[in-house]
Image (cartoon, rainbow, N blue to C red):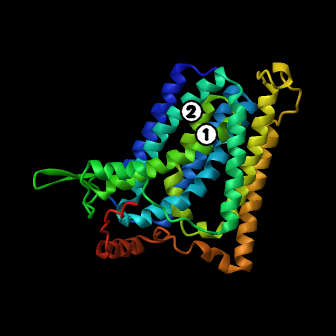
Amino acid sequence: MNVPLWVWLVTIVGFVLVIGADLWLNDHKPHAVTLGEVTRWVVFYVVLAVAFGCGVWFFSGGTYAGEFFAGYLTEYSLSVDNLFVFLIIMSAFKVPVLHQHRVLLVGIVIALIMRSIFIAAGAAVIDRFSWVFFLFAAFLVYTAVSLVKQAAGGDDEEWKEGRVLQWVRKAFPVTDDYHGAKTTVKIDGKRWLTPMLIVMIAIGVTDIMFALDSIPAIFGLTQEPYLVFTANAFALMGLRQLYFLLGGLLNKLVFLSYGLAVLLAFIGVKLALHALHENELPFINGGQPVPVPEVGIGLSLGVIVGVLAVTTVASLVAVRMKPELAEQGSGITAPPLARTKEEAARIEAQDEQADHRVSAPPRD
């Protein structure tokens, strides 16, 4: 797939304009979001991704379009699982309802920039060393096994601030109170950071960590850097609206981790087969390619859609039959979602009276 530089530039400018419009339309006047508002934005981003995929089909053919859709669905499904952690972080930092949109957007922009660097580095390494696919495959299978163990254990680990946030708190003074949407504030002639900036960094760093399995996963579906980048961008851009729309439903997706484990293991096997087909390692078949079957993008797309559909339906049916299954994550506070503007106003009034003080956590 030969993508000219001007196409890259137009694509990046397009993403910047969409994100800028999203930021201005939703955050120039902070407010509690409504069901209709987030639904429209989720539909908009999905339609935008589908339209882009159709454009890829028209200009580059069905194979590349299939790779884009497979990558987009995989990244989107992995992002849904990440929303659990986002909910925990938002609750831990007591982020005001009015500013949760902004926190998510800035955190996601940070993640998109860092992921772009990972994608460029990954593409360069893959182009020179085909054996890297063996490492990607092993890591994905390991991650799949870890997901199953975590899901089977049923224990939700409490989120803790990592080393990056600990360093920030050590290097800069941080207020306990939010100061509107400000990320820094001057107190007695001294510049302080606010919890708003800390939680933005937390969201961005957390999503970068999630990229450690999502980037290898999408490279297992396509080795085209342009498709890897755009699939990641579309999945991330629609993530913050999905956060509000699915926040109250996440606890009902009780089998999501198992479904994602199946997907990651499947892509890991696909990567291993591809690595054998492109083999250059001297201790495997004398450094010659191994004649193994490869998994086509059509089958990959079918498996992804099928696994996600079965996982979702099975989860909802299981929770309907045994409601206590959804209580395992009851400690997670879903973001408030108003159905009317009047209800949104009540949520804003209640949030203004809530305690949003965030003290620094004790160090280990």
Amino acid type of the residue tagged 2 in the rendering: Ile
Q: In this rendering, would 353 be left or right of 134? A: left
Residue located 60% across and 57% down the image: 81
- State the image coordinates of residue 163 (x, y, percent, origin top left): 41, 50
Q: Which mark is residue 215?
A: 1
| Quarter of the rendering containing residue 56 | top right
Residue 309 x, y percent position in the rendering: 75, 58
User: How many numbered markers are drawn?
Assistant: 2
| Whether residue 58 is situated above or below residue 147 in the rendered picture | above
Question: Could you classify mark 1 by the number of other residues whose Cα lies within 10 Å: few (under 14), some (14-19), or many (20 or more)?
Answer: many
Mark pair 2, 1: CA separation: 7 Å
Q: Residue furthest left?
A: 188
Q: State whether residue 332 appears in this view.
A: yes
Question: Could you tell me which residue is drawn at 67 percent across and 55 percent down?
Answer: 146
In the image, which disc is placed on residue 197?
Answer: none
Q: Position of residue 254 (x, y in %)?
A: 67, 67
Please state which amino acid type lies under the numbered disc 1. Ile
Q: Which mark is residue 119?
A: 2
**Callout 2 touching callout 1 (CB < 8 Å):** yes
